[in-house]
Image (cartoon, helix red, strand yellow):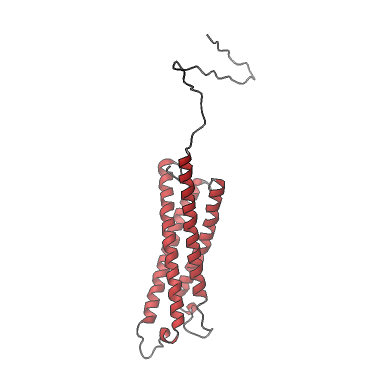
Amino acid sequence: MRSHQSPRNGDAASVTVMPSPLGLDLSPRPPFQSTLSLQKLRRLNYLALLLRLASFCFSVASAIFMAADYHGPRSASTWYHLDAYRYVFAANAIVSLYSLFELAVSVWEISMNATLLPEVLQVWFDFGHDQVFAYMLMSAGSAGAALSRTLKSPAPATEPDICSSRSSFCIQADIAVALGFASFMFLGFSCLLSGFRVACFIIRGSRFHL
């Protein structure tokens, strides 16, 4: 029979592992995480990175197209003189900066296997800002599309027909609005993914339910 001796003061406590009657090894082991779970986590991280990259590219392209739609400082048909087009430019410029930040966050998470902020802050930060900026892009695109439709409608004889005299202006503005809607689409997918991460964190205490 193996005797148990109490440790003296200052000595490290020794833990005696009793053998199992069936010959099984009952010694403690580190937590196990399957390779399949790690692969799923990496795929979701890469999916988030691709969605952020697409949203960034389309929002930057929309802001550039709108900013380049310029026909002279005294022309009434510049984007700067139209409130809806200014809104389209500002919304896409803001979303491009936000998407660039989220790109850096995604790269950090992939390379370091950890979130940039504490996990509870990161999941709520992403979800909240994705919602706000997605709604902002949608409203800006709707305002820009409504203005484009108004400019193309038959104008009274007392008002100049902007799109007939400056068709390139209206075409370029339409492209900017369409690119903004594409950025909204990818940001909406990012919002769904960030919502999934929030739900997993609430249920499981981790941003991914694997």
- In the rendered image, the quadrant that contains the C terminus is top left
21 w.r.t. 124: above or below: above
Tell me, yes or no, if residue 126 can be seen here. yes
Residue 48 in the image: state x and y as whole percent. Answer: 47, 54
Residue 40 percent coordinates (x, y) = 45, 45
- Give the answer, above or below, for where 69 lies relative to 29: below
- Image-based side of 100 in relation to 162, left or right: right
Q: Which one is nearer the viewer's eye here, 30 or 122?
A: 30
Residue reaching furthest right? 10
- Residue at coordinates 63% horizontally, 18% vertically from top-left? 9
- Residue at 52% x, 53% y is 106
Vertical arrangement, residue 205 with respect to residue 54, above or below: above
Q: In x, y percent, where is residue 63?
A: 50, 70
Residue 73 location in percent, x, y?
Answer: 54, 83
> Which residue is pictured at 51% across the width and 80% down the height?
70
Residue 13's image quarter? top right
**The quarter of the displayed image where residue 104 is located:** bottom right
Q: Residue furthest top?
A: 1
